[in-house]
Amino acid sequence: MIFSYFTILIMVNYVKKESLWNKDIKRDTGISLTQSLETDVLIIGGGITGITTAYYLKDTNLKVTLVEQNLVASGVSSRTTGKVNYLQETIYTDLEKLYSSKVATNYLESQLFAINEIKRIVKKEKIKCNLEKVSSYIFTNKKREITKIKEEKNFLQKQGIEVKAHTHLSLPLAIQYAISVRDTYVFHPLKYLLHLKKVCEAKGVSFYENTRIQKMEKLDDGYLCYTDKYEIKANKVVLACHYPFFLHPFLMPLKVYTEKSYITAFKTKNYQTETYITNTLPCQSVRFHKDNTSYMLYLSRSHQLSNHLDEKENFNEAIRGAKRFSKKVDYIWENDDMMTLDHLPYIGYLEKENPNLIIGTGYNTWGMTNGTLAGHIISNLIMGKKNSFSSLFNPLRTNHYFYPGMSLYILGVTAKGYIENKLWKNKSWYSKKVEFLKKDGEDVAIYHEGKKEYIVYSKCPHMGCSLIFNEVEKTWDCPCHASRFSLDGKCIKGPSSYDITYKKK
Ligand SMILES: Cc1cc2nc3c(=O)[nH]c(=O)nc-3n(C[C@H](O)[C@H](O)[C@H](O)COP(=O)(O)OP(=O)(O)OC[C@H]3O[C@@H](n4cnc5c(N)ncnc54)[C@H](O)[C@@H]3O)c2cc1C
């Protein structure tokens, strides 16, 4: 035990706390918005949803503008495992049970369509993003899960997909049963997105980085969107910002919850053209990546956001998990995604009879395919074209167990963290260097670093949840909806659209 604690301590000093995809990528600082403007389409958010939407709209006569609060491709899309995959745990049997075989088949078709689109775009635009064909596995080490995986196999075989069954893997992962398919892919998500950005810019799409939309006002013919200094008037607004920064319409906090995981990457001599994932929580997921060095990526410690708030423990657990494969961990980072309870993303209009506000989110950790689909569907909606997948992902669908069970469940999950944080003040979540107190009648938190003090408001501006100090990454994190703030209070991840830097009265 003592040995393991010290080994982790030593490893932690060497491990880079950033995504492997940033390695060797040179980026400029981006152009920020310096004046108010008008546009036909405003895309808020420069991840895979926003950039792909811009890509599909780039050849139209529409004036397209994309704004990103940080740098383009620095959000969730830059921290994925980068699998381009239709074998997504046991989603098809889940959809068959919840809806119907037709819905499951339609979802499979949508994922195959998206994979083909990514392949087509990579070829057409000559993108060097390490797109590589791989075999993908789902596996379980629990006997009770075997039947479920067998059902998934039956479903896929009925769709004409070749599926193999296995009782051993070539990795030291505990397994009872696994299935595998071919024709799935992996790529380098950041190289893909940064190249697409360049293609869009060359076709006249305007990108403004370090530009955050803070609020929006509905007009008869569109929206007026405000940054801290300027206004953008847009006929159509695309919410590609992962989690919208406003509550109305759509009441997103009642419809999704956030799942968070740690990903580690380490050098390997055992490079494989295979990916692996378990079908239940706690998820384990593996892929390999090769540039001038071969890496294995190992995802673990996945949990609903408010369930595991001790960041130090999460971090150490993730390192311990990776240690089963490698003595040295080179990279570790965390990522979170929006989960819908019916397993289907939300892509489309947010309000009945309002064709000017469109969203793409809720990808249930499969955003490379679903973000691409979102770009396709959203651009079709804007151009008034039919899309055979749009009804499947319609955010206004009412034919699932949404009210009241779904909302109550999500509220319960969020409330648990909220209450524990607010009422029980679980000390293990806080650093000894942090004080929570009242200043001029406001709730504030102070982080002491030597003689230096960082003072911030301690409530998340999104919905008022009390923030937790993340000792590993030195950030202020919201346990309710995953907003994050730097030490000095700058919002680095939404849904909050405001900073928490303390301003003396
Ligand atoms: C651990 C983990 C592993 C994953 N691995 C895979 C995988 O292997 N394959 C796969 O298909 N999917 C994977 N996913 C899922 C996938 O990464 C996401 O679903 C997808 O990247 C989400 O893309 P996005 O465009 O919606 O969000 P983002 O990439 O986060 O883009 C949204 C952007 O909007 C910006 N923004 C937010 N608010 C504002 C505002 N107010 N003004 C301006 N800009 C704003 C943000 O800064 C951000 O850059 C994984 C997810 C997780 C959590």
Image (cartoon, helix red, strand yellow):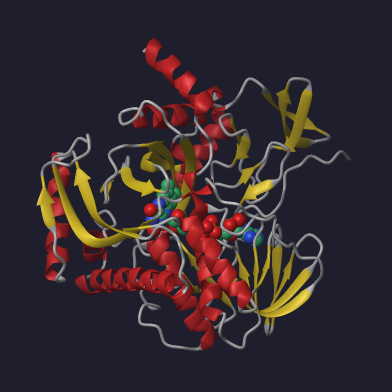
For the N terminus, the quadrant is top left
Q: Residue at x 32, y 40 (%)?
A: 282
Q: Quadrant of residue 150?
A: bottom left
How many labels, in total?
0
Q: Residue furthest right?
A: 505
User: Which of 307/120 is in front?
Assistant: 120
Q: Residue at x 49, y 40 (%)?
A: 333
- Residue 409 visible, this angle: no
- Whether 134 is drawn above or below 373: the answer is above
Residue 501 screen position, x and y as percent: 76, 42
Q: Residue at x 55, y 62 (%)?
A: 194
- Whether 376 is drawn above or below 324: the answer is below
Q: Is 40 left or right of 242, judged from the image as shown?
A: right
Q: Is 70 left or right of 351, judged from the image as shown?
A: right
User: Which of 131/54 is in front?
Assistant: 131
Q: Is 69 left or right of 478, judged from the image as shown?
A: right
Residue 359 screen position, x and y as percent: 52, 70
For the C terminus, the quadrant is top right
User: Which of 194/126 is in front?
Assistant: 126
Q: Is 343 left or right of 331, judged from the image as shown?
A: left
- Residue 136 visible, this angle: yes
User: Which of 58/308 is in front?
Assistant: 58
Residue 332 screen position, x and y as percent: 47, 37
Q: Residue furthest top?
A: 2
Q: Residue furthest front?
A: 292
- Whether 328 is drawn above or below 111: the answer is above
Residue 96 screen position, x and y as percent: 22, 65
Q: Residue at x 38, y 65 (%)?
A: 369
